[in-house]
Every structure is written in C-alpha cells, then in structure tokens.
Image (spheres, rainbow, N blue to C red):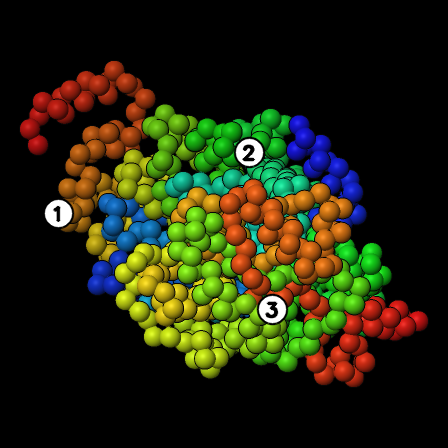
Amino acid sequence: MIEVKNITKTFGAHKAVDNISFSVGDGENVVFLGTSGCGKTTLLKMINRLIEPDSGEISIGGRRIRDQRPEQLRRGIGYVFQNNGLFPHYSIGENIGIVPRLLGWEATRIAARTEQLMEKLHLPPDQYRHAWPHELSGGQQQRVGIARALAANPPVLLMDEPFGALDPITRASVRKDFKELDELRSTTIVLVTHDVQEAFELADRIFLMDKGTIVQQGTPDQLLFEPGGEYAREFFEEQRFQLEAARIGSADYPALIRAFDHFRKTPH
Amino acid sequence: MDQSESLWQFMQQQSGKLLQQTVQHIGLTFISLFIAVLIGLPLGIYITRHRRAAGVVLGIAGVLQTIPSIALLGFMIPLLGIGPLPAITALFLYALLPVIRNTYTGIDGVDPGVREAAVAMGMTGAQRLFRVDLVLAFPVIMAGIRTATVINVGVGTLAAYIAAGGLGEFIFGGIALNNTDMILAGAIPAALLAIGLDFLLSLLQRMGAKGRMAAIRVLPAVILLLSSLYVFPIGNNSRLLAGFTPEFMGREDGDIGLRSVYGLKIRTVVISDAVMYKAIYDGKLDVISGYSTDGRLKAYDLTVLDDDLKIFPPYYAAPVVRRNVLQQYPELAPVLNKLAGRIDDSVMTALNYQVEYRHESPEKCAHDFLVSHGLYHPPRNGSKGTIRLGSKIFPEQYILTDMYAELIRGYTDLQVDSKTGLGGTKICFEALLNDQIDLYPEYTGTALLAILRPPLHDAERLAANRDSVYAYVKHRFNTLYDLEWLDPIGFNNAYALMMRRKEARQLGIHTISDLADYLKKDKL
C-alpha cells in the first residue's frame, strides 16, 4: 500500500530522516517508535506531503505522491493530531464532516456518516452534534479527531501521537474504543509514538527509530524477545516485565503480581 | 442651562445642514474605510505568507500613520487638488495601518495546530483562507477595522479644510468665530458617531462563529452602502464654484450677508484659507473669500470684487498703545504716526507679497520701505527706556512692527523689545491690557466685532463707514481700557471676494452685484 524508498530530510545541519526505506502492506498497522527528535513525525508528515522530502520516493497504492495534487492526496489520507487540531469555529458535527464536504458528498450522506462515527466513538450524536470543541473534554475531543480522520473512509490513516496528550485512564479508554472500530480492518495505519505500550498494543509491525534511521523492524514479539542490538534492548528494558506479561496475555492478576515481585527481586 | 438651550436652538435652526454634514461624514468615513479594507486586507494576508515583506509593508504604513493629519492633507493638495479625492486618500492612508496590522496579527495568531489540520485535511489555499484563517482572525481584524473607523471619524473633520464637507465645517467655523454652539453642533455629532460606530462594530467583533461567516459576506455590502451616502457637497448648480473659509461661512459680514444683501446664489464649498488661494489659481475654484491685502492676491493674479453694497465692515489698521506709555514718552506718538496714511491697500499687498511669496524677511521689507520713503534714520543710542512691541502671528503684522521698531530706534532715544507672534487678537489684546506689551497694530473691524462686540444694530449702523468705526473704537478703548488708537496707517485689510483677474474681466464682473447678476442670468 505504502512504499517508501530512500527518503531523506534535512533541517539545516540536522538530518531528521536519513535514507529510510520501508513498505506497509494493505490494511497493515505499523508503528514508528522512538524518542522525541528521532525523526518519526517528520517521516509521517512526508507521507501526506505536509513536509516534502529532500530526496527519495513515496508511493501510495502504486502512485507516486509527488505526481498528485497535494489537496487531492490529503483528502484520501486520514490524519490524527496529538492536539486534535479541531476547528474551534466548527461544531462537532461540522468538524467530522470536513473532508466529506471537501469531497462534495451530499449533506444527508455526510450527516449519516457523522452520526455513525459519533455512535461508534461513544459521542451521543443528539448531545454532541451541535456542541463546540471547547465544550468537550480532552478525551472526547480526541475521539472527534479520530472520527474526523476516518469520516471519508480513507484507505490510509496517519496518526501522530494520537493519545499522547491524554491522561493514562482516558488514554486507555479512547484507545480501546479506537481498536474496536471496524473501519480499521480495511485501513492501512501508520502511527508514530514514543509510548512503548501503545506501540505493542496497536502494531502489527513496529519500526524502532533512532537519529533518523530505522534501528530494527519486526513484530512486537520479535522486538521484545529478539532485540537486534544494544539500543533496542535498552529501549524496552524498563518496561520489559509489563510488556512480556501483556504478550503472554494473562488475566491471572494475583499470579502476575507474584511474578512481578519475583521479577523485581531477581537481579538481571 | 443657557448653553444647552442655545445649542439646541442652533442645532434646530441648522438641522438641514447638520444632517447633510453628518451624512457626508459617514460617507467619507466609510468610502475611505472600504478602500482601506479592500487594499489592507489582501496586503495583510500577503505578508502573513511572505514574512520578509511584512517589515517593509508595516513600516511604510506606520510611517504614514505618524504624519500629522493636517500635513498629510497639505501633501495631498499639490497632487490631487481639493475636494473629496485628497480627503478620501488621506483618510484611506490613515485607516490602512490598523487594517493591515490587525489582519497580519490576527492570522498570525491562529493556532498553528488548526492551520496544519486544515492543510492535512486537504483544504486548498483559498478554502483555508476563507473557512479557517479569516474566520478565526475575525475578532482581531474587526478590532483593526474599529480602530480605523474611529480614526476616520476623527480625522474626517479635517476634510472641511479642503472642501470635502463633513462635520468639520461646523467645528472649524465655530472655532474661527468663537461660537461655542457651532463648535458643539459639529463636535457632538462627530463624537456620537465615533462612539456609535465603535459600539456597533464591537458587537460584530464579539460575534460567534456562525455570525462571523455571515458578517464576512454581508459586511462589504454594508460598508459600500454607507459609502454611497457621500455625495460631493454641492449647493445648487451654478457654473461658478465658490470656496469660503469656515469662518466666512458663519459670519453676518460673510456668506450670510452675501445671500441676504446681494442675493448671491453660488455653489459653495468650505475650505481652509491655507489652500484656498492655490485652489482658485489652479482653477479648482472660481470665487474665494480672502483678505484684501493678502500677498497672494498679487502672487496668483487675483482681483478683488468691489463690495458695492458695503457688507464687509472696514478693517483699517492703526497702532493701539497704552495711554501711560504715551504720557511717559510724549515723543512716541508723533513717531508712530509717521506711517499714518502712508500705506494703502496696494502697497500693503505688495509688501505682503514680498514676504509671503518671495520669502523676503519682514525686517528687510520694512527697512527697504522706510528707506525708499525717506523715513529711515539710523538708530540712536536707546538709553532712555524700552518700548515693548507686540504683533499677531502673520506677516503683515510682522512687517508693521518691524517698521515701528526702526522708527522708534531712529527718531527717539528709546530702546525696542519686539514680542512678535502673539497668536491671535485675544492674546495680543490681553497682553496689552495686562502691561506685557506697550503697543501692537490692530484693525478697526476686529476691535469692533471681536473685542467690543456691541449689540448687533449698533454694529450694523457703524459697519459701512470707515470713520465712524474708527471713532467708535477709539472712544470705547479710551474710556474702557485706557488704550489709545493712533492715526490709521491707511490700508483696509477687510474681507473681500476674489476672482481670477482674467476670468473676472472676461465675464465683465467688477462688483459683487455683477457677480450676483451674472449667476442669476447664467442659471436661466
């Protein structure tokens, strides 16, 4: 679906993205994981031409994005921002309907789609359709941001730290509802985050980034159990226990706590 | 109590004029505002996208803003003449900075996250501008438009100086005539206009998102509609156009007398005397109200129409001196009277011309005159005492005081201390009364109408006769103030109607009656 070849982007003397290549399959969910400043957001923004690469080639669905009009390209790519980026002068309903409107959908179709998405994201339409963004909580605003990105059924969804600005409890709740969206099955998702747990929870494949390059790529299990180098090992060390526990998928909490105690006492 | 009653009366009497001026003022304000928005808004948008140009554009607009309004109008006249065009241009230039700056600041202040979202969603540049940037910057842009409107209402009063109408006609007429009712009749509506428009625009500014979208569509039409209120101030449709000063417009011995005594019906605009002469010379005006000894009369080849029905009272000049000074130095009066009868209208006009137009110093001009008339004596030692000379703040007075100074130094042992440039009549007269100066040249008509202010019928009875006015003011000054009027110098610096010499000759107009007749015939 997405094909990235030898992409480089330099800001002044700083190489934000250094000759990166990768591809993402149809409907695949990939996560770019890394500390802030590793170049992951720059990489993401080059996919919908918010930033133009210095060199290299990106194609989506077999078409080079360079050859498309940026507006047309972007209308086919959903985008979720860390700080929601909702239009403060548009109601919730209007915010969700922005891209369908740009695409010239009929009003009834937009209304139906908006309503459908609001229900799926647990925003009762009657209560919130005419509300303003500032009247909503942070978690609700982020739900609207997700609905807006998905409104026109884009084949590709880009997410920039989509849950990063939320408190842990809200984050878990929004993430859960997000994961349950049936839209996601057919959507190719590229998500960037510094949150290891988030990456493990959402990713089919993880790209671990450092200093503008991809350090390791693979399934979550591969990264966790077969770290490809010192950086990867260190990156997961702190949360290894939780991650491993989550991978094992145990719901036996007392057993987990015993295991955790044991884990803490054991030198490693 | 009296004040508010007489003001109310005045406003009722002049309600037609007041309404016309108010409507003109609103029109003037909004035409220039409309152009300012038309140019300022795109310019403001442009500099948010081309940051390097921002400094230059805002800098130029800022410099324009710092030019004093009266000076800006002055710059406009050589380029654009008089009337609505230079007035609108000047107001437009003042309105420009707030519009550009607030557009820039407003759009710049839109949350970058929202702007990026608009791009990421696939909005085109125009869609982003009209659906996001302008709507979100709307309160700030409106604040700029509010500022510009209030500035325009204020500066718009100055339009009356260059024949563009508006409420300034009453304000400056009132100031010139020392008529408080008239000043307030212009100033109060102007202030209310500023406050009212500011309030209305503040409602727009605070409007919610839905209202803003509507406002962006409707506002240009409203501004355009208000602009159309401005019609060039034209009284009736005579072929000749007159330009009268605000003062002249409001005086019995001015426009009012011309209408009632001569039955003169002429298209009239109100204009400042600073630009009036140039305007008639350039053919923008055909008749003006001037002063009969003004040097520009000669410079611009104008002719004075004879006041055959005598509505302009005589303004003969003579020195007014403190009586105790004349008693202390008996030799002074004869020396001052050496000028008496020496300078007639044409001589004084020529002297004024040298100073005003040829830019010679009043001192040299005075000296040359005395030498050529055999009146010059070199200064003596000046040991006996000091005479303090005062003068009002225009060239004719400077020339006269310089002559008196040379005469006193040459013919007496007195020293001279010149305190020239004492503003207007009131300041000179108060200075004389309070023993700050010993003498200054005054005009009989001014003394009569501005200082003594006799009841109207007395003034009318006196007005036409040169000698009776002189005798009256001499007597009254003597008994009321212990001040002496010495002999008149000769010339009469009165109000006068003037035309271009060539045109007056072509049309066969020599007197004001001729002009009135010509206009009547011309209309038929």
Residue for point 54% across, 55% down:
B485
Image quarter (top left, top right, bottom left or bottom right) of the N terminus of chain B? top right
Task: Kindly state the secondary structure of the residue where label 1 is placed.
Answer: helix
Q: Label 3 to label 1, Cα distance in Å?
A: 108 Å
Disc number placed over residue B213 in the picture, else none: none
Answer with the quarter of the image where residue B465 lies.
bottom right
Q: Nearer the viewer, residue A174 or B303?
A: B303
Residue for point 8% across, 32% down:
A268
Q: Are marks 3 and 1 in contact (CB under 8 Å)?
A: no
Residue bearing the label numbered 1:
A230
Q: Chain of mark 2?
A: A
Image depth: mark 3 or mark 1 in front = 3
Left or right, A84 with reference to B22: left
Residue bearing the label numbered 2:
A132
Residue for point 67% across, 59% down:
B467
The image shows residue B355, relative to residue A91, as above or below, that is below
Q: Nearer the viewer, residue B250 or B47?
A: B250
Q: Residues within 10 Å of mark 3 (few under 14, many from 20)?
A: many
Disc number placed over residue B491 in the picture, else none: 3
The image shows residue B126, relative to residue B308, as above or below, that is above
Image quarter (top left, top right, bottom left or bottom right) of the C terminus of chain B? bottom right
